[in-house]
């Protein structure tokens, strides 16, 4: 099936023609696409499709729905922090500045300084940026008509790649390249165990960011799948809609509220684990 | 039996088994954390942070299994 045919099939499943296909409909709401949807009036804004020239590998760098969502998240963050920073002359913070300051102070004192033993303040900027970016993307996904950029594995893979570089560079900066890799093996092991542990620890330094990536992606995707599955139940059991609809809506509302908690929790967990891993790399156990 | 049907069955069973494992893990974890907090209420904050991290690690693996099952059921 070509791309347009697949889209047509999804559209048909979505809007009633030829029966309702819950799988296609749920996928349609989760996967990335090259148009923006405006809810209620059912209008589609086509986004530009850009392909690099063949000489450069013909890479597809089209602007997609999730890219736009990330831009919106960046815009919101820039705006919110600019407004909050403008008010730094206030002796007692209130309103927006207060709300942001609570989270920033928590990130610095409880996450960065408690996880990273040596020079934590160097990493505070990265950790805060990651936290607020993931949080904004997660929460944007809960706004009707928007999409969850963090529910796309490419986005979380990018974030995890950055975390990987921060973890490795933190250790290398502190100890130098050779000592950093020597630190993977704890002191006082029997000699024959050293290569085994080294290989295991080397693998684990790749698995850690991979797990970060999968965790964020799966959490954000799963929540949306559950909400959509509850809504789909109404259409699957359309003969008894009067009995199913109130229950479905109530349950999906409950999951929606749970998702707000998950949005905060996952942003926190991602940052917290990154901080812990940086801490392990910067100040390894002896 | 129809192989596609068997694949769906596998996906469903896989999801259930993954959930059993994760539930057992998180249940144990939460139980121990509660016990710890009940014994030493002053260290509740530390225990909570450690518990959240461990729960996230368990949950990450459970979700990995669930994603595999989900993709299997949509094939």
Image: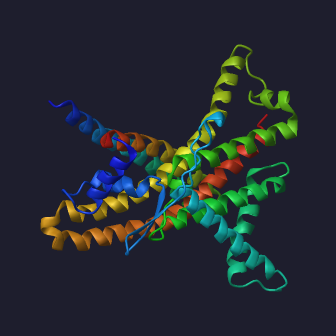
Q: Position of residue A157 (x, y in %)?
A: 59, 45
Side of A140 relative to A233 (left or right): right
Nearer-the-camera pick, A237 or A184: A237
Decide if residue A37 is in sight here: yes
Decide if residue A113 is in sight here: no
Q: Residue furthest left?
A: A239
Side of A73 relative to A107 (left or right): left
Q: Position of residue B34 (x, y in %)?
A: 51, 58
Answer above or below: position of A53 versus A131.
Answer: above
Counting labels gives 0
Side of A153 relative to A74 (left or right): left
Nearer-the-camera pick, A182 or A73: A73
Answer above or below: position of A166 versus A253.
Answer: above
Q: Residue at x 71, y 50 (%)?
A: A275
Side of A180 relative to A40 (left or right): right
Q: Residue at x 41, y 45 (%)?
A: B24
Nearer-the-camera pick, A229 or B49: A229
Q: How is the image coloured?
A: rainbow
Q: Which image quadrant for residue B37?
A: bottom right
Answer above or below: position of B20 versus A146.
Answer: above
Q: Residue at x 66, y 69 (%)?
A: A75
Answer above or below: position of A88 versus B6.
Answer: below
Q: Assign the C terminus of chain A to one quadrant of the image.
A: top right
Q: Assign the N terminus of chain A to one quadrant of the image.
A: top left
Q: Residue at x 32, y 68 (%)?
A: A251
Q: Position of residue B62 (x, y in %)?
A: 44, 44
Nearer-the-camera pick, A107 or A136: A136
Q: Position of residue A92 (x, y in %)?
A: 79, 86
């Amino acid at each position: 099936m070509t791309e347009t045919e697949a889209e047509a099939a999804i559209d048909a499943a979505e809007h009633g023609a030829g029966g309702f296909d819950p799988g296609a409909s749920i996928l349609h709401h989760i996967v990335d696409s090259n148009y923006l949807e405006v809810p209620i009036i059912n209008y589609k804004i086509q986004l530009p499709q850009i392909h690099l020239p063949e000489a450069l590998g013909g890479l597809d760098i089209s602007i997609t729905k999730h890219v736009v969502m990330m831009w919106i998240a960046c815009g919101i963050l820039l705006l919110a922090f600019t407004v909050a920073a403008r008010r730094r002359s206030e002796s007692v913070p209130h309103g927006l500045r207060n709300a942001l300051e609570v989270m920033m102070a928590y990130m610095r004192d409880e996450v960065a300084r408690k996880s990273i033993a040596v020079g934590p303040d160097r990493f505070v900027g990265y950790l805060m940026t990651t936290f607020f970016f993931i949080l904004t993307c997660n929460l944007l996904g809960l706004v009707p008509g928007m999409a969850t950029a963090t529910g796309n594995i490419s986005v979380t893979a990018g974030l995890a790649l950055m975390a990987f570089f921060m973890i490795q560079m933190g250790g290398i900066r502190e100890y130098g390249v050779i000592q950093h890799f020597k630190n993977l093996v704890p002191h006082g092991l029997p000699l024959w165990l050293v290569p085994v542990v080294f290989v295991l620890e080397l693998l684990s330094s790749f698995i850690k960011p991979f797990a970060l990536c999968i965790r964020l992606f799966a959490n954000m995707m799963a929540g949306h799948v559950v909400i959509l599955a509850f809504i789909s139940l109404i259409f699957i059991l359309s003969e008894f809609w009067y009995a199913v609809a109130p229950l479905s809506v109530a349950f999906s509302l409950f999951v929606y509220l749970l998702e707000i908690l998950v949005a905060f929790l996952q942003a926190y967990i991602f940052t917290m684990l990154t901080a812990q891993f940086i801490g392990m790399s910067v100040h390894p156990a002896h | 039996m129809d192989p596609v049907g068997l694949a769906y069955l596998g996906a469903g069973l896989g999801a259930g088994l993954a959930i059993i494992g994760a539930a057992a893990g998180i249940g144990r974890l939460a139980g121990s954390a509660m016990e710890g907090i009940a014994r030493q209420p002053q260290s509740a904050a530390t225990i909570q942070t450690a518990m959240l991290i461990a729960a996230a690690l368990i949950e990450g693996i459970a979700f990995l299994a669930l994603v595999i099952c989900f993709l299997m059921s949509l094939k």
